[in-house]
Structures are given as structure tokens and as C-alpha cells.
Image (cartoon, grey):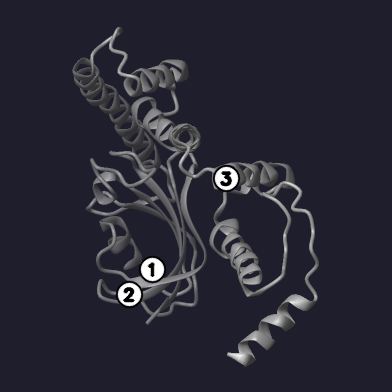
């Protein structure tokens, strides 16, 4: 125990008492409790929270606002009103930057967007039990019905545009088509190395894009995986290649993610893949 006291004394020798500025009061380093309280508080801030915050609040002005909010909560963590405001603000940021954008894209594609004011007012009325415009049951039925109609309209447009794109590509002289409907062009050939089989482990660089050039995914460094279990267009197409080859694939939706889509990739979307087969193991 004596050694511990000596250690803690050494820790506090160089620490001065200072005013906390925005803090809750003075920082006093008088004993073990003072020192460990301050040091763990700082450790929690830096290790647990600071590096997890969005980039938008990393500048000093925004960070001061964050710290002020933390201190206000620390003074009275059971203040229900302030807690509710903080949660509402956080959920508002998440809702409008994530769900609002994703749903708008699903229902209108790149051709239109949600009415933001109506979306926000509908959210508000639902939280406050304000059923003057429509009841929850009416809203639920309406949103489900229109979601089906509007999303299918977007998917139909994606399907038609994909089919027209592939039809046009199939007429280009340097584009080849397999029996499955996969189309490809040879960008460059390697030295004629190994060809993969469906069970091969391979290493590739690739870029996945929409037919109008929107990049969905990209591997700048070689990515290693087993060929089996991928989308059908990749499994078939990569077996046409040899080590060092670079191809561009035009993959119909039924050889890609089909009627369900994947992440940002909508249902019925054709995909364009630039692929370099780096190595076959």
C-alpha cells in the first residue's frame, strides 16, 4: 500500500490546479481520487468517444458545443426534458441523413424526391398523437400501398433502362456475349497465366458501377476470395480470364442481384464490372 501511495504522489506532483473554463468547476489534484477521476474521464473521452464522432463535429467550434452538451447532461443526468431533446436531435440527424435519403431513393430513384416538410410533419404528428390529418392505421395502410406502387415504378424503370443498355452494348463490335447473357470486352491481356475454376481461390482488383457510371464498390488493393459463392456473372466471367487479364463485364440483373437488389444496387439493375485478375492460387 505504501508503494501505491508513492506512485500516486509522483503522478500528481506535476499537475497544477486550474479553472475548468467550460467545465463544472476547478480541477484539483490533491489525492488519488482526484487524479484517477480526471485521468479516466480524459481516457474515456479520447479512447471511447472522440474518434467515433462524425467528422462534421471534429472542428473546435463544434467540439465545444458537444462538450457543453455533455456538461449540461452531467450536471443533471436525470433531466427528462433535456434528455428527450438530445435524443430527438440525434434521431433527427440519423433519420434525415439516412432513412429519409434511402427511402426517397427507393421510391423515386434519381427522378424525384420526398416532400421533406410533409415527412417531418408526419413524424412530428405521429410522435405527438396528432391524428387530425389521418390516423396511424390510415397512414400505415397508405404508406404500404404507395410504397409498393412507387418502388415498383422505379424498379420497372431500372429494368427497362438496363435492358436497353445491354441491347445497345450487344451490338458493339468489341463486346462478346455468352449463352447465359453475360457480356464482356477484353481491356488488356496478361502473359497467359493460370485460369481459375469455380473452386479456385483468386486475387482481383475490381470496380462495380451502374450503367450510368455510379460506383457502388471498388477494390484499389487486390482482394482475395474463393470464386464459388459469388454472383453468377462473376463466377462465369472470371473463368474466361487468365492471370494478368483485365476485362469489363456487362452483367444482366439475373446474373447479378436480380429482383431483390443489394444495398445501393436497386432490383433489376444491370452492372458494369471492371476486373483485373491478379493471381490464381
Q: Residue furthest bottom?
A: 3
Report the residue marked by disc 3.
Answer: 75
Left or right: 273 in relation to 133: right
Q: Nearer the viewer, residue 99 or 66?
A: 66
Q: Position of residue 272 (x, y in %)?
A: 42, 48
Q: Position of residue 196 (x, y in %)?
A: 33, 75
Label 1 vs label 2: CA separation? 8 Å
Q: Secondary structure at mark 3?
A: helix
Report the residue marked by disc 1.
Answer: 241
Q: Nearer the viewer, mark 1 or mark 3?
A: 3
Sequence-first tag of 1 and 3: 3
Give residue 85's mark.
none
Q: Secondary structure at mark 2?
A: loop
Left or right: 278 in relation to 280: right
Q: Nearer the viewer, mark 1 or mark 2?
A: 2
Residue 164 lies, with reference to residue 130, above or below; the image says below
Residue at the image position 55 percent from the left and 57 percent from the top? 49
Residue 252 lies, with reference to residue 232, above or below; the image says above
* Quadrant into which the N terminus falls: bottom right
Left or right: 74 in relation to 109: right
Q: Position of residue 18 (x, y in %)?
A: 79, 59
Residue at the image position 50 percent from the left and 34 percent from the top? 82
Report the residue marked by disc 2.
Answer: 196
Residue at the image position 20 percent from the left and 15 percent from the top? 138
Q: Secondary structure at mark 1?
A: loop
Amino acid at each position: 500500500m505504501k508503494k501505491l501511495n508513492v506512485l500516486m504522489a509522483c503522478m500528481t506532483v506535476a499537475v497544477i490546479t486550474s479553472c475548468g473554463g467550460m467545465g463544472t468547476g476547478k480541477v484539483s489534484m490533491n489525492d488519488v481520487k482526484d487524479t484517477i477521476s480526471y485521468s479516466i474521464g480524459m481516457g474515456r473521452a479520447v479512447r471511447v468517444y472522440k474518434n467515433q464522432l462524425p467528422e462534421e463535429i471534429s472542428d473546435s467550434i463544434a467540439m465545444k458545443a458537444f462538450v457543453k452538451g455533455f456538461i449540461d447532461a452531467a450536471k443533471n443526468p436525470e433531466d427528462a426534458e433535456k434528455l428527450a431533446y438530445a435524443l430527438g436531435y440525434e434521431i433527427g440527424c440519423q433519420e434525415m441523413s439516412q432513412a429519409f435519403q434511402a427511402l426517397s431513393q427507393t421510391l423515386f430513384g434519381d427522378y424525384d424526391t420526398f416532400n421533406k416538410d410533409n415527412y417531418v410533419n408526419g413524424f412530428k404528428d405521429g410522435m405527438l398523437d396528432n391524428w387530425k390529418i389521418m390516423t396511424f392505421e390510415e397512414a400505415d395502410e397508405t404508406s404500404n400501398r404507395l410504397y409498393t406502387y412507387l418502388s415498383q415504378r422505379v424498379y420497372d424503370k431500372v429494368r427497362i433502362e438496363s435492358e436497353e443498355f445491354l441491347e445497345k452494348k450487344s451490338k458493339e463490335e468489341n463486346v462478346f456475349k455468352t449463352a447465359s447473357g453475360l457480356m464482356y470486352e477484353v481491356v488488356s491481356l496478361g502473359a497467359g497465366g493460370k485460369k481459375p475454376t469455380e473452386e479456385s481461390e483468386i486475387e482481383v482488383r475490381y470496380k462495380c458501377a451502374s450503367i450510368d457510371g455510379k460506383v457502388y464498390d471498388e477494390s484499389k488493393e487486390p482482394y482475395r476470395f474463393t470464386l464459388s459463392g459469388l454472383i453468377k456473372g462473376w463466377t462465369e466471367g472470371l473463368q474466361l480470364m487468365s492471370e494478368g487479364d483485365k476485362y469489363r463485364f456487362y452483367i444482366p440483373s439475373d446474373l447479378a442481384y436480380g429482383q431483390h437488389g443489394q444495398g445501393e444496387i436497386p432490383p433489376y439493375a444491370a452492372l458494369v464490372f471492371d476486373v483485373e485478375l491478379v493471381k490464381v492460387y
